[in-house]
Image (cartoon, rainbow, N blue to C red):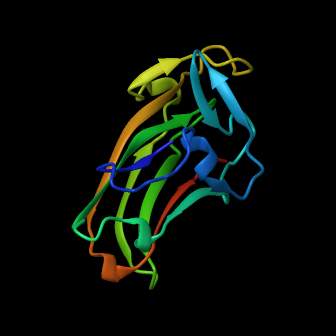
Amino acid sequence: MPTVSPAKYDVGVHNPTELWENDCDATEKTCQGHTYFGGYNECAHGHSFWRKFEAARIHPATNRLVLTGKIWTIDSWDGEQFTIAMTVQDGTEIATKSWQGNNFANLADQTVQCEGSVQGWHDGFFEITLAANYDTSMGDVTVRITNTLD
């Protein structure tokens, strides 16, 4: 899952998937050695994953946040997309970016076939980067991942 870089945010755990919340009871899965949340028939449109980064734990000299990680698209994505947004404490969105899901177009940075997926549909992940100017006076930062998958 995505993490904030540079590594000035002390997360205090070794497994980043423990740090993300979701509103769809997503379960942790493994596909060809990669761990992810969600999967076939989980967490479609109307659901999201999020993580709050507390300003008090972000290094005071930080002037830019850079989010990097992998976002998986599993099963059929027919023109649907996922969006990642960074929002500060007062609700201001400081960065957002959308990607079109994988499916037949083979758009992902790495394409695999995960267990339980329909043969011929390209599961895979995207290497994502999202950056924003930031000052700790802006307060806590929430990163939210949403999608239009039906």
Q: Nearer the viewer, residue 61 or 121?
A: 61
Position of residue 87 relative to residue 89, above or below, is above
The residue at the point 44 percent across, 85 percent down is 90
Q: Is residue 149 visible?
A: no
> Percent position (x, y) of residue 98?
40, 52
Residue 121 horizontal/vertical position (percent): 59, 21
Residue 103 higher or lower than 136, as above or below: above
Residue name at image x 24 percent, y 63 percent: 64
- Relative to 115, 102 lies left or right: left
Determine the residue positioned at 65% across, 24% down.
30
Q: Quadrant of residue 140?
A: bottom left
Residue 84 figure quarter: bottom left
Instruction: Looking at the picture, tell me which residue is in the foreground, 6 or 88.
Output: 6
| Above or below: residue 133 compared with residue 20 | below
Look at the image and tell me whether residue 51 can be seen: yes
In the image, what residue occupies the spot 46% across and 54% down? 83
Q: For this rendering, which residue is in front, 126 or 60?
A: 60
Left or right: 99, with 124 as reference point:
left
The image position of residue 15, as x and y in percent, is 57, 38
